[in-house]
Image (tube, rainbow, N blue to C red):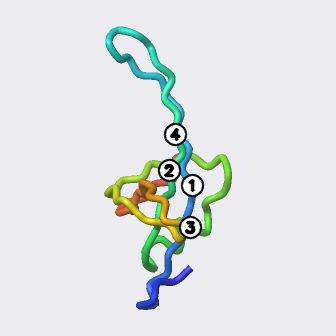
């Protein structure tokens, strides 16, 4: 996918599962979040991404309005590291 200005974007869905203590109780944490990889610096990483690959992503969160008018939280990647 490309932006109107010609910047390539790769969109992935990141699944997070963990357990964290909250108020001295162990909680299961689970979420899915859309991640946007923008620009040519992510081309080599994007080619290696497939279901089940573990990654570490750093970036910033942004509210994005979909075509249906619904808002969603999106992570714009600034760094992506494949975990082996």
Asked if the residues shown at circle 2 and circle 1 are in contact, with their CB atoms under 8 angstroms apart, the answer is yes
Q: Nearer the viewer, mark 4 or mark 3?
A: 4
The answer to the question of whether label 4 and label 2 lie on touching residues, with beta carbons closer than 8 A, is: yes
The furthest residue to the top? 24
Instruction: Name the image quarter holding the C terminus.
Output: top right
Helix, strand or loop status at disc 4: strand
Residue farthest along the right direction in this orientation: 51
| Label 4 or label 3, whichever comes before in sequence order | 4
The kind of secondary structure element at disc 3 is helix
Q: Earlier in the sequence, mark 3 or mark 2?
A: 2
Tags 1 and 3 touching, CB below 8 Å: no
Classify 10 Å Cα crowding around label 3: few (below 14), some (14-19), many (20 and above): some
Mark 1 vs mark 3: in front: 1
Asked whether 56 or 68 is in front, the reply is: 68
User: Residue 58's spot in the image, x, y percent?
Assistant: 36, 53
Which mark sits nearer the N-terminus, 1 or 3?
1
- Residue 35 position (above or below residue 17): below
Residue receiving disc 2: 33
* Picture residue at 53% right of the left edge, 71% below the top: 67
Where does residue 28 sit, x and y in percent of width and height?
51, 23
Question: Of discs 3 and 2, which sits in the foreground?
Answer: 2
Separation (CA) of disc 2 from disc 1: 6 Å
Task: Measure the alpha-carbon separation of dots 4 and 2.
Answer: 7 Å
* Circle 4 residue: 31
**Quick check: 37 above or below 58?**
below
First along the sequence among labels 2 and 1:
1
In the rendered image, which residue does mark 1 sit on?
13
Rendered image: mark on residue 46: 3
Q: Residues within 10 Å of mark 1 (few under 14, many from 20)?
A: few
């Amino acid at each position: 996918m490309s932006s109107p200005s010609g910047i390539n974007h790769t969109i992935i869905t990141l699944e997070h599962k963990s357990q964290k203590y909250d108020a001295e109780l162990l909680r299961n944490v689970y979420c899915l979040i859309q991640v946007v990889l923008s620009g040519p610096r992510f081309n080599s990483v994007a080619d290696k991404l497939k279901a089940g690959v573990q990654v570490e992503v750093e970036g910033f969160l942004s509210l994005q309005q979909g075509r249906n008018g619904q808002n969603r939280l999106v992570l714009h990647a600034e760094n992506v590291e494949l975990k082996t």
